[in-house]
Amino acid sequence: MDNQHITVIYKWTANPGKLDELTAIYAEVTKAMEQNEPGAEAVHIYASEEENALYVRDEFKDAGALGFHLQSTAAAHFPSLLEIAVPEPFFFFGDVPQELKDATEQMQLGAEFALHTSGFDR
């Protein structure tokens, strides 16, 4: 992982009875990212029936890839997501430019940001 890489981890809590619909929307999101976003390196969705929620981990090559995602796939699906679920805070790990921080504020993601300080990859 280089210093340009950005990881985003977040949770959507579905309205009662809407977890299957939320999961279906995220299947569409995942497919759209895989097909249309070359800078999206990975997406992993985890469902918790106990919490009626999805946990999501997105991996982006860099801030440009994140910006493209926010303007394309995220923008296209966000209204339908808000109809059936509540977003929890979004955690952005990596060097996110101020203009993207401002965009997440407009989307009311409750975003939090942190820079990488140490670690390793095998």
Image (spheres, rainbow, N blue to C red):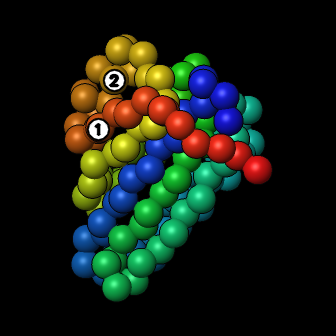
Please state which amino acid type lies under the numbered disc 1: Ala
Q: Which mark is residue 26?
A: none
Identify the image quadrant of the N terminus: top right
Q: Residue at x 47, y 43 (%)?
A: 8
The residue that appears at 29% across and 38% down in the rendered structure is 111
Q: Secondary structure at mark 2?
A: helix
Q: Cβ–Cβ below 8 Å for labels 2 and 1?
A: yes
Residue, disc 2:
101
Q: Which mark is residue 111?
A: 1
Q: Is residue 46 above or below residue 11?
A: below
User: Which x, y percent locates residue 85?
Assistant: 29, 61
Asked if residue 117 lies left or right of residue 59, the reply is left
Badge 2 amino acid:
Lys
Badge 2: residue crowd in 10 Å (few <14, some 14–19, many ≥20):
some
**Going 76% across and 50% down the picture, which residue do you hit?**
122
* Cα–Cα gap, marks 2 and 1: 8 Å
